[in-house]
Each structure stands twice: as C-alpha cells, then as structure tokens.
Amino acid sequence: MQKTTLTRILGILLTAILLTGALSILPVSADEIIPGDVDSSGGVDISDARLVLQHLVGKISLTKDQRRAADVNANGKVDIGDARLILQHIVGKPVELLEGGVVSMRVGISLPTRDLQRWNEDGANMKQAFENLGYQVELQYANFDYDGITLQIEQIRNMIANDCDVLIVASYAGWELTDVLAKAKAKNIPVIAYGSTIVPSDVVSYYIPFDLWEMGRLQGQYIADALDLKNANGPLNIEFFTGDPGDNNINFFYGGAMEILRPYLNSGKLVCKSGETEITHVATVGWSSQRAQERMEYLISANNYGPDKVRLDAVLCSNDSTAQGVIEALKGAGYTTDNIPVITGLDCDITAVKRIILGLQSMSLYWDSPYMCECVIRMADEILQGKPVTVNGTVTIGYGEWEFTVPAYKCRPLVVTKDNYKEVLIDSGYYTEDDLVIK
C-alpha cells in the first residue's frame, strides 16, 4: 500500500514538473544546511522533493549547497533515491533525515534456532521484506539447545540497548524471557510474540500464533480417522511424543490432541502400553530428534513392539523433528512402509515431506510460514506507522495472577498427506518438484 502510494506520488510529481516551469531557487548557507531542506525553508516538505525531481529531469540545476541538502542517502550524488526518501519522510514512512544520511526505524527479530528449515526461511523472508519497506533489521538466531535460552536473552538485551523500535520474538522457552522483555516494556518497545507463547504475557503487546490447540486437534483427529476409532473394536496401541518442556506451545499441541484421543484411551479402544500419557512424561527436551529416537528405542524394547511382536498402531508426534527420531527407531526395529504405525508431525520440513512421499510418515501440518511472515510484517509495519493494528481475536495465556489476554492474529494450519502435498506445497510455490526429489 505504502509503496503504491509513493510510486503514484512520484508519477504525479514528475508529470507536474515536466509540465510546469522551474521555481526560483534561493541559495542556502553551508552552515545552515538541513538534510532534505533543499529550498532552505527551515523544514522538509513537498517543495524540496519537487526541486530534486526538477534537477533530475534537467529543468533546473541545484547549487552546491542545495545538492548537499538533497543528498539525504549520503552517496555523494543527487539521485532518484534522494527524492524517494524525502517523499517517504513527508508521507510518514519510517525515515528520519539526519546529517550524514538516512536513519530508518529498527526492527529486532529474535528466532530460536537455525537447526530447522522453517526458522531459517522465516528469518530471511522477514529481513528482506522489512528492508524493502525501508527499515533497519537486526536478525538473531539463538541456536537453541537446552541452554540456548541464555544466548537468546543476551541477543534480545542487545536489541533493546540498540533502541529497536519493535521486537519480534519466537522462543522455545518463552517463560524465561519475561525479565528481559520487561526492559523492552519499560522503554515502550512493542513486543510481538511470533508463533510461540511468552509467559507471563504482560510484556507482550501482540501475538501471532497458529491456532495451536486446533493444530493438536488436527493431529489427534488424523489418528482417530486413520484407525477408524469410531468403529474399531480395539484395543489399538499408541505412544506419545511432544516437544520441549519449557516451550509453552506443547500445552496447546498436546492438549488439543488429547481432547480427541483421551476418550478413546478412557474407553479402552486405545491403549498406551508404556503408561506414559502425562505431558511431563512425553516431553522431548529441545524437540531433539536424537532424544526422541532414544526414548522410542527404549519403548520398543520395554513393550516388545515390533512388526512380528506386539503391534504398535500409532505414535502421536507433535512435530517433524520428534517424528524423525521415532521413525529412525522404528526402522531400526524392522518396521517398513508396509507396517509402520500412523505417525503425525508438524512443520512440513523437506525431509518430513520426503518421508510422507515414501510412506514412512503419515502426515504433517503446514504452518504456511510465508503467510505468517506476511502477518507479522504487516503488524509490525502498522505499529511503526501508528496505524490501527489488524487482529482477529485474543489469546489468553498463563493462569491465576499470571493470566493475561493478548490481542492476536490467529492463522490456521493445513493437514499435508501423500494425497495432497503437491497441491498444498508445490502448487503454492513453497517447494518445487526438484526440492522433493528423493535420491
């Protein structure tokens, strides 16, 4: 919207300049030069942009001091970029004209890890989009492991010290960020929780989640449908894996899934032979594939699961990295595409989609990260422009005295299977056919 408006203004101004004569130019003193104030009026307004454009199309020639005032991007010459920046300043784009160049407003982005494709792509997409809008961007990854939150806290502290104007934060341990984000709140820096919750949430201004409870329900419902639990006699065996115990999201993922599956556990149609159904027992530190594999190997041994032993019908995995570990353990126990249990996932990483194509993983949930990026970019831009912020609901996070309701824009995920991965992931442009070639 802003880019279109700016282009239209430039077009109108260029047309007007070419049709009208030159304005009189008043010289300015070198000691009184204000960046952008080409006509030495004491401020930056449309007349200054007009003079720059007249100079560029050859209608006038600016004096030396006027060229100094006009060169707001400090590249040593007067060009269309200077006119654009002056116009951005006039129409309220996030640009401040200072001696020696242009200082734009700063966006701080703190993401949890480089280890997952999703976060790498989100970070790159956000950085590029914000820079295209004229913002400075500080993008940091915490390279999260069990102790990685210490690094993320330090990175966020530095962004606050650098006077960022808005913070976008995604974390696997949001409950650890309260103190550092309180410093952002004290400096009136808006905080957008991106795809993960931060508890307590009085330090969060806005929240952009996928509907996490619904994501868990979708995984649970997939298992219920795949096993035809409404009509099955049972008992059918299932085991459970979710994510890092410090990631508040697992309460939504697992809670949503168990809303669907617990009635079948209570009725005896589903049986968890390990007895491990409480979230504290099924959490996987760091969402680690290796830890998930080790626990699945133990469950296989302890419960005598195997293709020719005790039947295992399904494994609920809250994301693709835990699913990867589970599948490796099952393959090691002799399972193949012909007899592997129903296995869920989330993220649609390339390796997970390849497992779906091969028949090793049953499904994954697609976050539609590009859409989520568009939402957070729009929200941050609206905040920085002082515009009404687009939300479509609220999210209540925490409990008791730490329960807070945060304005939110909720996104809904899509179920991806072998039957629809081309339509959802390739036709949308998220992946190409070559990306998913299995070698």
Image: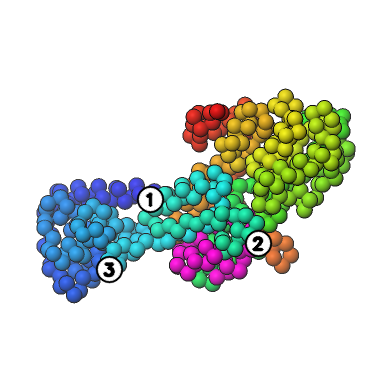
Q: Amino acid at mark 2?
A: Trp
- Asked if labels 1 and 2 touch by Cβ distance under 8 angstroms, the answer is no
Residue at the far top in the pictured view: 338
- Tell me how far mark 2 sits from mark 1, CA to CA: 33 Å
Mark closest to the chain's N terminus, 2 or 1: 1
Q: Secondary structure at mark 2?
A: helix
* Residue 413 quadrant: top right
Residue under pointer 3: 99
Residue under pointer 2: 175
Residue 219 in sight: no
Q: Amino acid at mark 1?
A: Asn
Residue 242 in sight: yes
Residue under pointer 1: 132
- Tell me how far mark 2 sits from mark 3, CA to CA: 42 Å
Q: Is residue 343 above or below residue 79?
A: above
- The magenta segment is 154-183
Q: Amino acid at mark 3?
A: Glu
Observer-nearest of 23 and 238: 238
Quadrant the C terminus occupies: top right
Observer-nearest of 209 and 395: 209
Q: Is residue 3 left or right of residue 196?
A: left
Question: How far from the left and from the top, in percent, is residue 139?
Answer: 47, 56
* Residue 300 quadrant: top right
Mark closest to the chain's N terminus, 2 or 3: 3
Colouring convention used in this rendered image of the protein: rainbow
Q: Secondary structure at mark 3?
A: loop
Within 10 Å of the Cα at label 1, are there few (<14), some (14-19), or many (20+) other Cα atoms? few
Q: Is residue 30 magenta?
A: no
Question: How far from the left and from the top, in percent, is residue 313?
Answer: 79, 32
